[in-house]
Amino acid sequence: MYAVIEGIDTAGKSTQLDILKQKYKEAIFTKEPGGTKIGLKLREMALNGEAKSKVAEMFLFLADRAEHIEEIIKPNENDMIISDRSVISGISYASNLPLEIVTTLNLIATSNILPSHIILLELTSDELIKRLGNKSNDSIESRGIDYLIDIQNRMKKTIEMLNLNHIYIDASLSIEDIAQKIEEFINE
């Protein structure tokens, strides 16, 4: 199983991943970007806004994704892998190019290896405003509410376009309710 938790910033991915780490101690936990040694460098470059062009930023993430597939996903294909983000985020955050082109580039980077289970934690605009107001924001979060909600909508379009096994969960539910829904989905 290759399960991923997706969602825009502040949706609660980290909280749910911490819960999953307690329940599935045998699973391999990883993240995109930054799940590999090269990926950590690429993630830092992207999140610090070092790439001045959106296309360059996308290629940093594509390089990370290709390395992640080779180093983490392929060698562990017979194990349970749970990832913080995946190709879904990669396609969705590259919003300066048409979805179809970005999807093709990401499928090349992943060697057509896609997650078996997608969990998308969804936020409303109001909830997002509240959550972003409680923290300092990185270069991507600083792009604003409309930008992040557009990314969330692109995530849903991407999941549906790739016809992936998925569940959408209201991120404003209690932590416990979300965790229960995730566990039911993983164990179905």
Image (tube, rainbow, N blue to C red):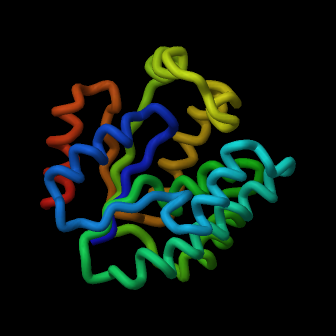
In the rendered image, the quadrant that contains the N terminus is bottom left
Q: Position of residue 2 (x, y in %)?
A: 33, 69
Q: How many marks?
A: 0
Q: Residue at x 63, y 49 (%)?
A: 93
69, above or below 62, in the image? below
Q: Residue at x 48, y 78 (%)?
A: 71
Which image quadrant for residue 40? bottom right
**Is 70 positioned to the left or the right of 105 in the image?**
left
In the rendered image, the quadrant that contains the C terminus is bottom left
Q: Position of residue 118 (x, y in %)?
A: 36, 57
**Is 161 positioned to the left or the right of 81 in the image?**
right
Q: Who is closer to the viewer here, 145 or 69? A: 69
19, above or below 28, in the image? above
Q: Residue at x 46, y 31 (%)?
A: 10
**Is 36 positioned to the left or the right of 63 in the image?**
left
Q: Position of residue 126 (x, y in %)?
A: 48, 16
Q: Residue at x 42, y 83 (%)?
A: 74
Which image quadrant for residue 143? top right
Q: Who is closer to the viewer here, 148 or 45? A: 45
108, above or below 126, in the image? below
Q: Position of residue 148 (x, y in %)?
A: 59, 34
